[in-house]
Image: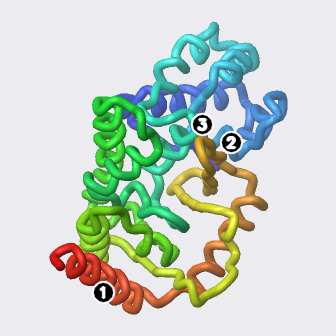
């Protein structure tokens, strides 16, 4: 797979990826050949070059040895690894920003890219009930900044399957969830996103164990990301990504149609608004 022609000024990670591709090609190595002594796949090297993966110091040092780059990657990987997101999510967030398509299953909360400020604040406060207000403010700010991805009218294609539990998990202030659901509905009606609701009546399904995010890229292999409490894992193994892709396809087959889903989302939001006023 040819490396992506990146603008080196776009980010330290993009610069590092571009330099890695140049150094590898100068050494006459394929992505698979460079990955072999590192015990990683050629796809992993491709993702480093495309900027969808962060380079960790351990790999940077080994690459300097293999490619004879006089410590360049070890010196510069620190800047490329800096992130405003938690360690377990940083790589996924960075990949998300470069994705051409994002398909996500959300079993419990509205996905981060679709959250309103009030909803995000309630979620983070629930995660960290004793955190100072300044910490929550920063978390909310970073989460809302991710939604800038949707400012482009077409890219990335975002397709979400929301479990019905997402619509029903309401706090003391029902207006917060009502506003959040109205925001999702507005994005659907503007044809910016595709959303399906997986109803309780669908019964057991292919993603009972947790959330799932699938990302595809223009010039890099696809990735799958699964997340738990304070942990997450990014997969690039083709068989694993394919397995998760099948799980997502089965979810969409069991979910309501996009039109039926929009009707349910708006109906539930209206119920919460009515209850709040009452």
- The mark that comes first in sequence, 3 or 1, is 3
Residue 109 screen position, x and y as percent: 46, 62
Residue 54 seen anywhere in this rendered image of the structure:
yes
- Image: 58 above or below 151: above
Instruction: Decide which of 57, 181 is in the foreground and name it.
Output: 181
- Image: 210 above or below 268: above
Q: Residue at x 65, y 85 (%)?
A: 203
Residue 99 screen position, x and y as percent: 47, 54
Q: Residue furthest front?
A: 278
- Image: 223 above or below 250: above
Q: Tell me, yes or no, whether the two marked residues, 2 and 3, touch with CB atoms within 8 Å.
A: yes
Q: CA distance from mark 1 to mark 2?
A: 44 Å
Which element type, helix, strand or loop, lies under badge 1? helix
Q: Residue furthest top?
A: 70
Q: Residue at x 74, y 67 (%)?
A: 243
Q: CA distance from mark 3 to mark 1?
A: 44 Å
Badge 1: residue crowd in 10 Å (few <14, some 14–19, many ≥20): some
- The mark that comes first in sequence, 1 or 2, is 2
Report the residue marked by disc 3.
48
Count the marks: 3
Quadrant of the image occupied by residue 250: bottom right
Instruction: Decide which of 54, 171 is in the foreground and name it.
Output: 171
Q: CA distance from mark 2 to mark 3?
A: 6 Å
Report the residue marked by disc 1.
267
Q: Residue at x 64, y 62 (%)?
A: 210
Report the residue marked by disc 2.
44
Closer to the camera: disc 3 or disc 1? Answer: 1
Badge 3: residue crowd in 10 Å (few <14, some 14–19, many ≥20): many
Q: Tell me, yes or no, whether the two marked residues, 3 and 1, touch with CB atoms within 8 Å.
A: no
């Amino acid at each position: 797979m040819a490396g992506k022609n990146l603008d080196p000024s776009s980010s330290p990670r993009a610069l590092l990826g571009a330099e890695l591709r140049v150094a590898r090609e100068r050494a006459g190595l394929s992505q698979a050949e460079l990955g072999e002594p590192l015990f990683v796949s050629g796809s992993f090297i491709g993702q480093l070059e495309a900027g969808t993966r962060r380079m960790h110091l351990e790999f940077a040092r080994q690459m300097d040895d293999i490619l004879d780059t006089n410590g360049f990657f070890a010196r510069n990987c620190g800047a490329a690894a800096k992130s405003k997101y938690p360690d377990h999510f940083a790589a996924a967030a960075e990949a998300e920003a470069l994705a051409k398509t994002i398909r996500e299953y959300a079993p419990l909360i509205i996905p981060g890219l679709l959250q309103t400020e009030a909803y995000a604040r309630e979620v983070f406060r629930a995660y960290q009930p004793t955190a100072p207000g300044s910490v929550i403010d920063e978390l909310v700010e970073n989460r809302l900044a991710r939604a800038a991805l949707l400012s482009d009218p077409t890219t990335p294609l975002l397709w979400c399957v929301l479990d019905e539990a997402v619509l029903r998990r309401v706090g003391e202030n029902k207006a917060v969830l009502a506003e959040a659901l109205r925001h999702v509905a507005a994005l659907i009606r503007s044809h910016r996103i595709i959303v399906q609701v997986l109803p309780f009546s669908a019964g057991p399904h292919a993603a009972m164990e947790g959330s799932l995010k699938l990302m595809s890229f223009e010039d890099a292999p696809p990735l799958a990301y699964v997340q738990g409490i304070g942990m997450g894992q990014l997969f690039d193994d083709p068989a694993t990504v394919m397995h998760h892709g099948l799980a997502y396809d089965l979810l969409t087959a069991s979910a309501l149609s996009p039109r039926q889903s929009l009707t349910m989302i708006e109906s539930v939001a209206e119920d919460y608004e009515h209850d709040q006023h009452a």
